[in-house]
Amino acid sequence: MNPEPAHEPRKVLVLPVALAIAAAVLIIDIYTPQEMPPQYLYVLCILLTAWSPRTQTLWWMTTLCTVLTMLGAALWPPHYDFYIILFNRSIAVILLLATALLVQAYRRTHEQLRTLNHELEARVEDRTRDLSHAFEEREELNRNLHDEVLQSLYAIGLHLESSSRLQQYGPIEPGGPRAWVLQQLTLVMRKIRSYIGEQPAPETLPFDQALSGLIRDMTASGNTRFTIEVDKSLAYCVPAAQAAPLLLIVREALSNSVRHAQARHGTVTARRHNGVMRINVEDDGVGFDPADAKLDGHGLANMAARARQIGATYHFHAGPGEGVRVVIEVPLEKEAAVGEHR
């Protein structure tokens, strides 16, 4: 908030006060000896115009005070020393003009400072907004790189480990491990290129197929066997704006389970009920202490952030030796829910 300017008319009744002072000075000037210069008090009237919103008020008041200075001498009875009066009145007029010039310089400087202050505040607001936007973009890019690129590369590494005992100079069989690795590497490169603007992101599959494919790709080479239950009616009732973050949350949960859980069995379910989709990712592994996990890595924070972006509810249940269960609940948009009847 900007402070109110010093010359605000609604706070000081400039003109009435100045006129009252001018009338009082005129009366004093008439009834005092001419050797005394009470007309110098007209300076107060001119100084008051610094608070006036109009520049013309300054010069109108200066002219009035000059006329009153001369009038005060004319109204005095003829028993006076003419040269003393002339000297006093001349000095008074010069003083009034000098005061008016100083007030005008003050007003100009004040206006310039106000203009500079507004410009500076506008620049600070623009800079703050730009920095905030850049920070949000950086955080989003960090999540994307962590959840998509790093986890995709990790899944490729799992498949390379499972196929390390295969002959490396034989033909690549369609559907084989090496063919899958090449396919995944191509997808990762497409994602990176889409981040830097070289090409648009590839078209996405219906949500049920994308979710099922993601689960198979992330768990195919691990020791944990996952049971998959995906409601087929979710194919076209999940908007693209919600589908992409949901898949990334599931990817992160599966990656944590495969890498850290040491589980034998896991379950992934996705069901719809009363306009709400509920996704569960659960395993019977070693679990973890939630208090320690929040201090290590970005996975849990990224999942929570993505859930907030799409208005979803995210929470997890974990404990040492108790396995992990991640639950995501998201309301489906009415427009998208029409697709379930197609």
Image: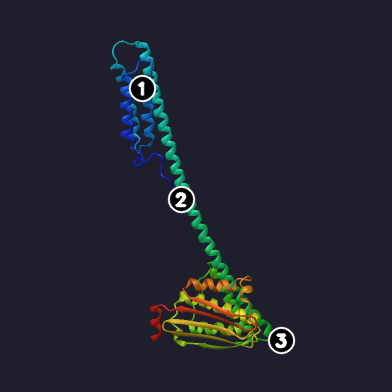
Q: In the picture provided, is 20 more to the left or to the right than 265?
A: left
The disc label shown at residue 39, or none? 1
> Secondary structure under badge 1?
helix
The disc label shown at residue 122, or none? 2
Q: Which badge, 3 or 1, comes first in the chain's sequence?
A: 1
Say few, some or many: other residues with alpha carbon within 10 Å of mark 1 (under 14 / 14 to 19 / 20 or more).
many
> Between tags 3 and 2, which lies in front?
2
> Secondary structure under badge 3?
loop
Residue 342 in view of the camera: no
Locate residue 37: give its quadrant. Answer: top left
Separation (CA) of disc 3 from disc 2:
65 Å
Locate residue 298: give its quadrant. Answer: bottom right
Asked if 123 appears above or below 30 in the picture, the reply is: below
Name the quarter where the C terminus is drawn. Answer: bottom left
Q: Say if mark 2 contacts mark 1, CB within 8 Å.
A: no
The disc label shown at residue 165, or none? 3
Residue 339: percent from the left, percent from the top?
40, 83
Residue 14: percent from the left, percent from the top?
34, 35
Q: Say if mark 3 contacts mark 1, CB within 8 Å.
A: no
Amino acid identity at mark 1 = Gln
Depth check: give the residue in front, 165 or 148. Answer: 148
> Between tags 3 and 1, which lies in front?
1
Asked if 129 appears above or below 10 in the picture, the reply is: below
Q: Which badge, 3 or 2, comes first in the chain's sequence?
A: 2
Locate residue 275: give its quadrant. Answer: bottom left
Depth check: give the residue in front, 269 or 175. Answer: 269
Amino acid identity at mark 3 = Arg
> Secondary structure under badge 2?
helix
Which residue appears at 40% of the width and 81% of the height?
A: 337
Amino acid identity at mark 2 = Ala
